[in-house]
Image (cartoon, helix red, strand yellow):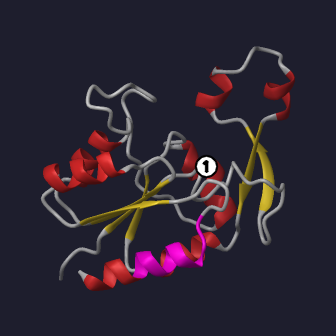
Amino acid sequence: MTQRPLLLLDVDGPLNPFRARFLRHRGYVTRRLRPAEWSARQRPGSRALRRGLRVRLHPGHGARLLALPYEPAWATTWMHEANEMIGPVVGLPELPVIEFPELFAKDPDGLYWKTRTVVAWAAGRPFAWVDDMVTELDVRHVAEHHDGPALLLPVDPRHGLRAREFAELERWALSL
């Protein structure tokens, strides 16, 4: 039996449409959360820290993601906190986590700072990666340095995952 491809999930952008022009997308719920990485960048005692980071999530996304023919994993700055704070809201079980050694580090070749770690973590397995920050430079790098098929699917952070992205993910996985 062959392994299913990996589905590497970013939180902010795909699951949390943080750049939405309107405060409410249909079906989304708003939570105020305090992830460690975000909290560390806030001024102690500040209003922002007291209130928490506003995160908009869709409780139905987990079921839709799990229905796809993939093995999902987190590829997000939330790292293990995604299992604690995001997964339960969207309906995902505990998932494997890609641990990024240095968040937001500038890449010498101009790649997105996650790209090299994602390629190493996938270790040649087919994967689809949904993220709002991937570029054509990252697509070319993955094609040159990853031994298996890969789909880098940019998601508009104003809208998050929508029907067209779910359809593209399903189409790509079934084409393997």
User: Circle 1 — which element?
Assistant: helix
Foreground residue among 152 and 71: 152
Q: How many marks?
A: 1
Residue 170 visible, this angle: yes
Q: Residue 83: where, in percent of width, then height?
A: 55, 52
Q: Nearer the viewer, residue 80 or 5?
A: 5
The quadrant of the picture occupied by the C terminus is: bottom left
Side of 83 where 114 appears, left or right: left
Spot occupied by residue 15 in the image (x, y as percentages of width and height): 61, 59
Q: Give percent across and percent down for residue 65.
A: 51, 73
In the displayed image of the protein, which residue is found farthest to the front? Answer: 136
Q: Quadrant of residue 101?
A: top left
10 Å neighbourhood of mark 1: few (<14), some, or many (≥20)? some
Residue 168 counted in the magenta span: yes
Identify residue for label 1: 84
- Which residue appears at 32% of the width and 43% of the height? 115
> With respect to residue 102, does 53 lie above or below?
below
User: At which x and y percent is residue 28?
Assistant: 77, 65
Prevailing SS of the magenta stretch? helix
Q: What residue is rendered at 50% in x and 43% in y?
A: 80
Q: Can residue 68 be seen from the camera position used here? A: no
- At horizontal 32% and vertical 32% (from top left) the residue drawn is 110
Residue under the image location 29 percent in, 70 percent down: 5
Give the residues in magenta.
Answer: 161-170
Q: Quadrant of residue 32?
A: top right
The answer to whether residue 29 is above or below residue 12 is below
13 on left or right of 118: right
Would you say residue 59 sits in the magenta stretch?
Answer: no
The amino acid marked with disc number 1 is: Glu
